[in-house]
Amino acid sequence: MKWMRRAGIAALSLLLLLTGTGAEAFDGKENTKDLHIEEAFAGKEGTMVLKNLKNDKVYVYNKERSKERLTPESTFKVANALIGLETAAVRDEYEVKRWDGVEREFESWNRDHSLASAIRESAIWFYQDLARTIGEKNMQEYVSKIQYGNQDISGGIDAFWLDSSLRISAAEQADFIEKLVEEELPFTEKNQKTVKRMMIQDEQDHFILYGKTGTRLSDMGLGWYVGFIETKKGTWVFSVNIDGTGTEAKNIAVEVLKEKKIINK
């Protein structure tokens, strides 16, 4: 079955490259169904992509929005961590960067951080410093290798993912996370396992939830939550964005996972 999974991913990757935004891969597919979750978005514009990796069924709310490329904000920390580990810009998840003493908008940022704690607290300064250590050449090489959205890092090595040049659709986010789950990205198995471990947000007897939020801090007008959930019955990948905050996006994802009985209430 592993070869079938790889073949499917390769075919989807080719389709993503040809179509540009990813969600076109859902069009006309019998295994794609509409998600009827309007109430969860409470009148705000947004989208959700949900995929069952056991049977490859895809569920989409607001298919047009799922194709729209938006700035990834702090969800890019997942890719940034992978690239940092692969290029040895950071040794492991425990390596600490010292806080520079600059007071920032969130108290949890104003201390020393490791790769793991900085992804949990979404400490932007840590990942900006990591990006500068990775350097533009290496960063562009890997962003292109993984076909991350429009692959445009021209907005500056420490800012291109923050309301800047880099853009990615919800469909492409889901595809990226699926490849991470399957450890099919162009990084070592060890590094992919490390980043997945850092993404754990809730670990219970019946499920493990992995995810990363992202919020456009300039106006709190774009929020993301991307990740996956492992259950005894299988693994699901999800990607949510909303004209709101990352917290709102996460709440929607969790609500839908409960509604679909993927998370047992």
Image (cartoon, rainbow, N blue to C red):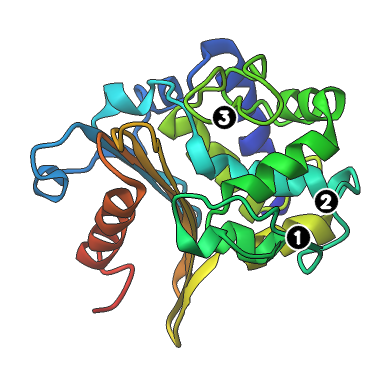
Q: Position of residue 205 (x, y in %)?
A: 45, 88
Q: Is residue 4 visible?
A: no
Q: Residues within 10 Å of mark 3 (few under 14, many from 20)?
A: many
**Local crowd size for mark 1, using a 10 Å CA cut-off: few (<14), some (14–19), many (≥20):** few
Direction from residue 179 to residue 130 in the image, left or right:
right
Please give left or right for residue 39 compared with residue 193 in the image. Answer: left
Indicate which disc, 3 or 2, sits on the residue closer to the N terminus: 2
The answer to whether mark 3 and mark 2 are in CB contact below 8 A is no
Lateral position of residue 265 relative to residue 201, left or right: left
Give residue 219's position: percent from left, percent from top: 31, 32
Front one among 31 and 240:
240
Q: Nearer the viewer, mark 1 or mark 2?
A: 1
Q: CA distance from mark 1 to mark 3?
A: 23 Å
Query: What crowding class fits label 2: few (fewer than 14 Cα within 10 Å), some (14-19), or many (20 or more)?
Result: many
Q: Quadrant of residue 262?
A: bottom left
Q: Which mark is residue 98?
A: 1
The disc placed on residue 85 is 2
In this figure, which residue is indicated by the disc labeled 3?
A: 161
Q: How many marks?
A: 3
**Residue 2, can we see it?**
yes
Kind of element beneath mark 3? loop
Q: Quadrant of the N terminus?
A: bottom right
Point 47% across, 62% down: residue: 107
- In the foreground, 214 or 11: 214
The kind of residue tagged 3 is: Trp
Q: Residue at position x 42%, y 20% from top?
A: 24
Quarter of image, res 101: bottom right
Which amino acid type is shown beneath numbered disc 2? Leu
